[in-house]
Amino acid sequence: MGSLWLKIKVWTKVIVFFGLLSYAALFIVMNSARQVKPWFWFGHDPDTSVLILVLCAFLTGVVGTILLRTTFKTLRQVREMRERGRSDRLQREMDEMKAKAARLRSRPATGDADVVSEGTPTERFDRRSNEAELP
């Protein structure tokens, strides 16, 4: 039963392909002999075949689509590049702030260098009050 559906699927694709191929051949034969006068600009009306006109219109559409897609891609890349530069700049500023804070923390205070390293804050307070009371 599976091979029957596979055969139907393959033959359907073959029939559709040859139908489109015969339509394209018929389109070329019927439109190659017809002449048209397309308007491009004032005072300039060239005689050309419908087939050439359709081919040029198709190629113009393809090129226009590619250019439009490339333009949008480029704009998106420029926007992403700006955002990445901004985030990198903010990250550098944050790193500089952290480095500066680390430098400030590592410096000992000028007069309290020996007191800062000894004991808890309450012990330091007790020692200072005791030293003040001594004659």
Image: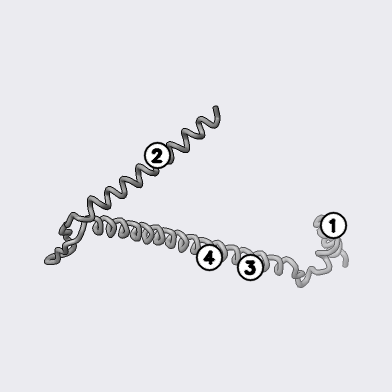
Residue sitting nearer the eye, 2 or 102: 2
Residue plotted at (83% across, 68% down): 114
Mark 4 element type: helix
Which residue bears the numbered disc 3? Answer: 96
Mark 1 element type: helix
Screen quadrant of the N terminus: top right
Q: CA distance from mark 4 to mark 1?
A: 50 Å
Q: Residues within 10 Å of mark 3 (few under 14, many from 20)?
A: few
Q: CA distance from mark 2 to mark 4?
A: 56 Å
| 36 vs 103: above or below | above
Residue contact between numbered discs 4 and 3, judged by CB atoms under 8 Å: no
Disc marking residue 85: 4
- The numbered mark, 2 or 1, whose residue comes first in the sequence reads 2
The amino acid type of the residue labelled 1 equals: Glu
Mark 2 element type: helix
- The numbered mark, 2 or 3, whose residue comes first in the sequence reads 2
- The numbered mark, 4 or 1, whose residue comes first in the sequence reads 4
Q: CA distance from mark 2 to mark 1?
A: 97 Å
- Which of the 4 image quadrants contains residue 34? bottom left
Residue sitting nearer the eye, 26 or 124: 26
Image side of residue 98 versus residue 118, left or right: left
What residue occupies the far bottom of the structure in this picture?
110
Disc marking residue 123: 1
Disc marking residue 15: 2
Residue plotted at (68% across, 67% down): 99
Q: Residues within 10 Å of mark 1 (few under 14, many from 20)?
A: few
Image side of residue 43 versus residue 56, left or right: left
Q: Residues within 10 Å of mark 2 (few under 14, many from 20)?
A: few
- The numbered mark, 2 or 4, whose residue comes first in the sequence reads 2
The amino acid type of the residue labelled 3 equals: Glu
